[in-house]
Image: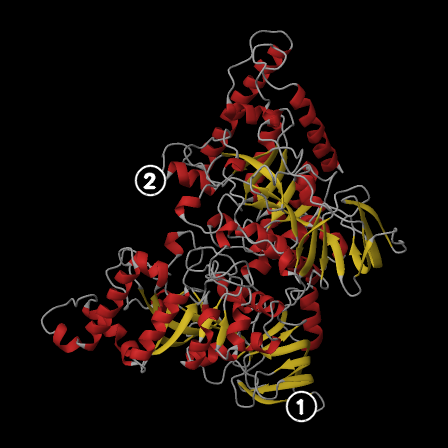
Amino acid sequence: MIRHLLLSLVVLSAAPFAAAEPVAIYGKSVWTGTNQGMIPDGVVVINDGRIVSVGPASSAAPAGAKEVRAEWVTPGLISAFSTTGLSEVSGVDDTNDAGASGSRFSAALDAADGFNPDATPIAISRLEGFTRLAVAPQARATLFGGQGFLADTTGLTGSIFRERAFAFIVLGETGASLTGGSRPAAWATLRGAFDDVRFFAARYMSHNDGNVLTRMDAQALMPAVKGDQLIVFQARRASDLNAIMDLKEQTPSLRIAILGADEGWRVAERLAELDVPVMVDAFSNLPASFSQLAATAENAKRLSEAGVTVAIVHFDNDGHQARLAAQVAGNAVANGMSFDAAMHALTTAPAEIYGMTGLGVLAPGARADVVAWDGDPLEVTSAPLAVFIDGEDQPMVSRQTKLRDRYRTLDESQLPLAYKH
Amino acid sequence: MQFRTLCLAAVAGLVVAACDAPGKGSGKDAAFVSPADAFPSTYKPYPSQTLLISNATVIDGVGGRIENGSVLIEGGKIASVGTDIAAPEGAVTIDARGKWVTPGIIDNHSHLGAYPSPGVDSTADGNEISGPVTSEVWVEHSVWPQDAGFTRALAGGITSLQILPGSANLFGGRGVTLKNVPARTMQGMKFPEAPYTLKMACGENPKRVYGYGRGSTPGGAPYSRMGNVAGYRDAWIKAADYKKQLEMAKNGGGEPPKRDLELETLAGVLSGDILVHMHCYRADEMAVVMDISREFGYKVTAFHHAVEAYKIADKLAEYGACSSMWADWYGFKMEAYDGIRENIPLVHNAGACAIVHSDSEVGIQRLNQEAAKAWSDGKRVGIDIPMEVAWQWLSINPAKSLGIDGKTGSLEPGKMADVVIWSGDPFSTYSKAEKVYIDGALMFDRNDPANQPVMDFELGQPGEGDRK
């Protein structure tokens, strides 16, 4: 209610801005993600879907520009890894397209085929400042989860902006259990699959099945094996991370990133040397499995200080709660990571990992994904006041806000609450 | 207020129960140890010093806030709280300028020790799914005190916590309240004289596990929510009968019934000795459960998860049950579909008892942040609760729900000195618990590795504790 009031005061209109209308977004702190660093009392001017200028509030805004005033202004946050949009209610199978334990296909499974831009977690994530998502399928039948994609959070048709952006492969304990019960089985499966791709022409000349992959899966995995497509490997234990880095050293053309890396700090120097980025959940600080005995709340800090590219994600219930990555990042700061590194971990790092050009920064010419906050974005008490995606002011309404508004008061003296909508 | 009376009555009832335990007085089972005395607590506070913490922002836990405040701890108890407290001779003093002091956080929904780290099949002891009614099991018999989760929770300012069995069953078994002090045995952690609790569950879980067990679990009833309700009522009818037989025997009206662990727990609820903690997401189901409790004459102390409590906050206030909630979990199953970020402040605003709980070895480490989220989300919709009032969601309200609010949960003279010194405003993500005192003893010091517990399981591993 208050949020709406404040907004209407500054925005003057509830209707979304037309893309061609310039908007000046003022912040007492403007975090740019570029070498402009943090601008106290800054302004970001956007027009026609792009950022026009980023500078001190004293710089001239175009005449007639709409104004938004906020405490903080940041680039739109990027959720580096989740299943957002693939399931409406995770526990209700009919609504969950994140993984398929019964499928005979694996690497060919294209998460984009399961994406529903109307899924309620998309608006809910947007309301918390996330403007872009890297979405991956879950690996359920074997260690190849399939193909991930990149999307914005407008919830509109066409919000996927890159299909088959990466291949997702699960190693470690989970990979082992998906391939028969051991890490050797997982690695035999992985090597066999890579061979299937490399010898595709010969192997599938007269057969539909290779040693590991069906013809369709081998075709789908081809760009990844050739180094044309990013592979996201999931692994936690130091020895698993080293095994992945061995693979990278044997095949330098592979483009890889590691998801999880709970024990990453133990191999941080090697990750930095090989330029392998990681996506970590900085909440992981328990020996919750035998693959994370060295988990520590300082993992993100140590990785970042070693020069590793670090993105921060929130894994738990990631089809719905990817939004908590900002809280995770704040906790990484509480555990020693620099604020700047933690902000990069939510913006430029995922942009770099996935090659999202013009995203994750406030810079002239960049795409106008901008969030105006009522406070420090890494504080749990802060929330966005306005979210722009490609310059469009986004509706700050979700199924949750509608439920909230219905039940804000419980007065049924005139009509049941069902009539309040 | 109504609630406080209920809990106090329950505590008083416990003493009575100990005297009137089944078998006693009949002369038949003289060696029989009453349920209240079985597995007694062996917890003893560790040595503490007279300690004066001064110049801090003090949140007293009962709605008050003192700037430049002091807290004096003597003999493991809160001696005084105020602005102008002189250090007694020989007292240790801490100048806590810029820091905050609060009561220790109490999580009334944890599975630590029962579903410990590492989470492997061999250690998964949190749910006795062998039948829909397993009120005969006590989760304390599953608690492994070497769970590293206890230490991480301690680092998050948790000083007491309730361990509950899981939610597969209609009646999941007894819960246990612990002091978060590492010990070799469960008994060494057990909160002295805390009343027992009973875990019950509504909704999807029981009907999924039993009715639709996919052949891997027993199968059979309940298949539906109406089956759930029939299951509760059927059990209460048996329990009422058992209780009646006990009472008749006590009054010289015949032989006591053969001891039955399942019915003993349920009869303990009917006599007010055991507090009901009920997993229930949906508003309509909570309303049905409140009616069942009226039918059989017991009280639900707290609804857990209570994702839809905001829809019936008025009814919950009128009934006098607490709602134990997450700040923002939603969508992971059908009955969590309507979760909203303002649930906790809306419940509080209706005058009902709100509690922030974790149900998670991760969430328990930062319940202060969860409260902060809910508090700020409330503010944005015009529910402006002072932060020091909101802190009640973290300490005194959970203490009430566990029947230990007479002993802990606030910084009031005479209470256990369960105290946290925070590096700054505990509603900021950047603040951390620096020192955690339990019964006045310093059990965690973030700046002193010698004062940070490391569990057996962690020793000799590549990571010993959180920060090695």
Q: Are marks 1 and 2 in contact (CB under 8 Å)?
A: no
SS at circle 2: loop
Q: Nearer the viewer, residue A69 or B251?
A: B251
Q: Are marks 1 and 2 on the same chain?
A: no
> Relative to A78, does residue B127 appear above or below in the rendering?
above
On the question of residue B347 being in view, the answer is: yes
Which residue, given by chain and number where applicable, does mark 2 sit on?
B216
Read off the residue under disc 1: A61
From the image, which quarter does the C terminus of chain B lie in? bottom right
Measure the alpha-carbon separation of dots 1 and 2. Answer: 66 Å
Question: Which residue occupies 82% across, 44% down?
Answer: B413
Percent x, y of residue A327: 58, 65
The spot of residue B403 in percent (x, y) is 68, 36
Looking at the rendered structure, the kind of residue marked 1 is: Ala
Question: From what the image shows, is residue A189 above or below residue A362?
Answer: above
What numbered label is drawn on residue A90? none
Residue at image location 64% in from the left, 38% down from the top: B43
Label 1 or label 2, whichever lies nearer to me, is 2
Q: Nearer the viewer, residue B205 or B402?
A: B402
Question: Which residue is more in the foreground, A13 or A393?
Answer: A393
Q: Quick check: A259 left or right of A55?
A: left
Horizontal side of A367 relative to A275 (left or right) equals right
Viewer-closest of A179 and A30? A179
Against B91, is A361 above or below? below
Pointer 1 local density, CA inside 10 Å: few below 14, some 14–19, many at least 20: many
Instruction: Give the x, y percent position of residue B94.
Output: 79, 59
State which quarter of the image contains the N terminus of chain B: top right
Q: How many marks?
A: 2
> At 67% across and 91% down in the image, what residue appears?
A63
Colouring scheme, one of rainbow, by chain, secondary structure, one colour? secondary structure
Residue A56 occupies which quadrant of the picture?
bottom right
